[in-house]
Image (cartoon, helix red, strand yellow):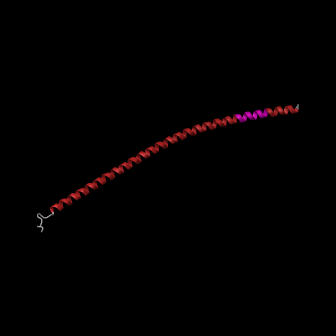
Amino acid sequence: MELAARVKQYEESSAEAREKSRAALQARREELSATLEREGNEFEKTTAELREAAQSWWSDTREAVEHQIDVMRADFEKWQADIKAQRAERDKEGKTAEPASKPDQG
């Protein structure tokens, strides 16, 4: 009888321990699930913010580079125009400096 009582007591305490463990495990599982969901949402938000920041940076950088290229092109075109003007001036001076008549050959 005493042995049967002990076995029954052991089975009851074992069942209680399993129930407590299951309840604790379920609570931990729910806690982890909530944490993963929260962190997943934060990750998505951060990713969206970083994507937007990267796109903005790229847009600003591209505009700055394009502006610099436009400035360089304008400077180059001005430089070419100045050279053409200098050549035209030299050609004009060279034609007026030629003698009116060429010496006879021969």
Residue 14: which quarter of the image?
Answer: top right
Q: Residue placed at 23% from the left, 59% from the top?
A: 87
Count of numbered marks: 0
Could you tell me which quadrant the C terminus lies in? bottom left
- Could you tell me residue 91's position as x and y percent? 19, 59
- Could you tell me residue 42's position as x and y percent? 54, 40
> Image check: 60 left or right of 76?
right
Q: Nearer the viewer, residue 41 or 58?
A: 58
Residue 27: which quarter of the image?
Answer: top right
Q: Nearer the viewer, residue 90 or 51?
A: 90
Residue 86: which quarter of the image?
Answer: bottom left
Residue 82, compared with residue 52, is above or below; it is below
Question: Which segment is the magenta one?
Answer: 12-22
Please name the predominant secondary structure of the magenta segment in the image. Answer: helix
> Image check: 26 left or right of 105?
right
Could you tell me which quadrant the N terminus lies in? top right
- Magenta segment includes 21: yes
Residue 79, compared with residue 27, is above or below; it is below
Q: Residue placed at 72% from the left, 36% from the top?
A: 21
Residue 84, compared with residue 45, is above or below; it is below
- Could you tell me residue 34's position as x and y percent? 60, 36
The extreme bottom residue here reads 106
Q: Residue placed at 64% from the left, 35% from the top?
A: 30
Q: Nearer the viewer, residue 78 or 97?
A: 97
Q: Nearer the viewer, residue 5 or 105?
A: 105
The extreme front residue here reads 106
- Could you tell me residue 2's position as x and y percent? 88, 32
